Amino acid sequence: MAEFEGKIEKIEKAKITNLDIINMVSEDSQIKLRLELVKRINPFKESDPVKVLLDDKANPEEKPKLILSGLIYSITKKEGVKTFDINVGGLRLRLDTPETFGDFKAKSNIFISFF
């Protein structure tokens, strides 16, 4: 399990119709998240504060704004940054973190909860 807090920095329109690209940054600016999300289920607005919880199981104790199930298809490390590429129902979530963030493995399932 890993978590961080931050804010929605920018919401862009994707080239594909009805798709938003959500850009989020952590409070300390060390973690960046970029998520492709269907506009109809996007609960976010720019500057919204957000807590993100990543775990190998869903967290039923808390009620998130949004919970996604995905597959980590690659983890790369370069110059002190660990990048997770996650497939979420055919859409992409990219997470850039410090190398010490999380103990997740490539080719494993993950739940991403947004509060």
Image (tube, helix red, strand yellow):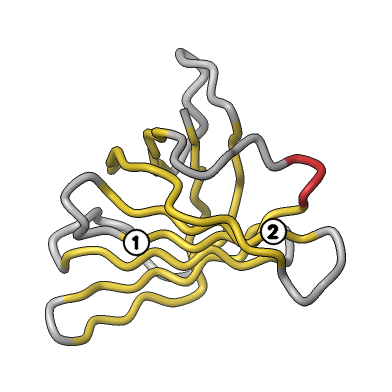
- Rendered position, 103 above or below 44: below
The amino acid type, in three-letter code, at marker 1 is Lys
Q: Residue 81, how many percent across, how many down?
A: 20, 75
- Label disc, if present, on residue 20 of the rendered structure: 2
Residue at 25% in and 56% down: 103
> Is there CB contact under 8 Å for labels 1 and 2?
no
Q: Residue 104, how many percent across, how many down?
A: 33, 58
The amino acid type, in three-letter code, at marker 2 is Asp
Q: Residue furthest bottom?
A: 78
Q: Quadrant of the N terminus?
A: top left
Residue at 54% in and 17% down: 63
Residue at 73% in and 66% down: 90
- Rendered position, 78 above or below 103: below
12 vs 114, nearest the viewer = 12
Residue at 21% in and 57% down: 29
Count of numbered tags: 2
- Label disc, if present, on residue 32 of the rendered structure: 1
Q: Quadrant of residue 13?
A: bottom right
Q: Residues under labels 1 and 2: Cα distance?
A: 16 Å
Q: Tag 2, which secondary structure?
A: strand
Q: Quadrant of residue 40?
A: top right
Label 2 Cα neighbours within 10 Å, binned few <14 / some 14-19 / many ≥20? many
Q: Residue furthest right?
A: 17
- Rendered position, 97 above or below 49: below
Q: Earlier in the sequence, mark 1 or mark 2?
A: 2
Q: Residue 88, how many percent across, how many down?
A: 64, 58
- Rendered position, 105 above or below 83: above
Label 1 Cα neighbours within 10 Å, binned few <14 / some 14-19 / many ≥20? some
